[in-house]
Image (cartoon, grey):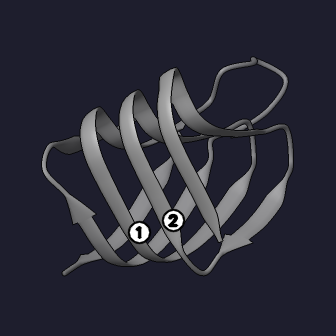
């Protein structure tokens, strides 16, 4: 479980071949809620993003890596996501 408030830029940033699993995520007041990049994979179940310009971001940042993947279930997002051409987001909303 992770709860983040008033973080400014990113609530959570995952990068460079990481694999993470979150069972409960609550992020309030950030520019990007959760960012995954550079061959990282994030599995998220039950997340709430409030006051975020972008809820989920998946991208390739460094040339020597590939894109990222996010698999998310039960997501509450008031805005949208950001995905580059090398990455994927699979999402079920509330």
Q: Is residue 77 above or below residue 30?
A: below
CB atoms of marks 2 and 1 within 8 Å: yes
How far is the residue under mark 2 from the one under mark 1?
4 Å
Residue that badge 1 annotates = 47
Which percent across, then down, holds residue 37? 66, 37
The residue positioned farthest toward the front in the image shown? 5
Residue 29's tag is none
Does label 2 or label 1 sit earlier along the sequence?
Answer: 2
Q: Nearer the viewer, residue 32 or 51?
A: 51
Residue at figure coordinates x 32%, y 52% from the top left: 49
What SS does tag 2 mark? strand
- The quadrant of the rendering that contains the N terminus is bottom right
Q: Is residue 33 above or below residue 20?
A: above
Q: Is residue 30 above or below residue 47?
A: above
Q: In the shown orientation, is residue 87 left or right of residue 84?
A: right
Residue 74 is drawn in which quadrant? bottom left
Q: In the shown orientation, is residue 48 left or right of residue 86?
A: left
Residue at figure coordinates x 15%, y 43% from the top left: 79
Residue that badge 2 annotates = 25
Any part of residue 30 in sight = yes
What SS does tag 1 mark? strand
Which percent across, then down, holds residue 76? 24, 66
Which percent across, then down, holds residue 87? 51, 46
């Amino acid at each position: 479980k992770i709860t983040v408030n008033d973080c400014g830029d990113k609530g959570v940033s995952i990068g460079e071949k990481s694999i993470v699993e979150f069972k409960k995520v609550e992020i309030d007041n950030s520019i990007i809620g959760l960012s995954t990049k550079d061959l990282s994979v994030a599995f998220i179940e039950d997340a709430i993003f409030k006051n975020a310009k972008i809820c989920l971001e998946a991208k390739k940042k460094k040339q020597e890596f590939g894109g990222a993947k996010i698999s998310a279930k039960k997501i509450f997002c008031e805005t949208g996501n950001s995905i580059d051409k090398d990455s994927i987001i699979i999402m079920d909303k509330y």
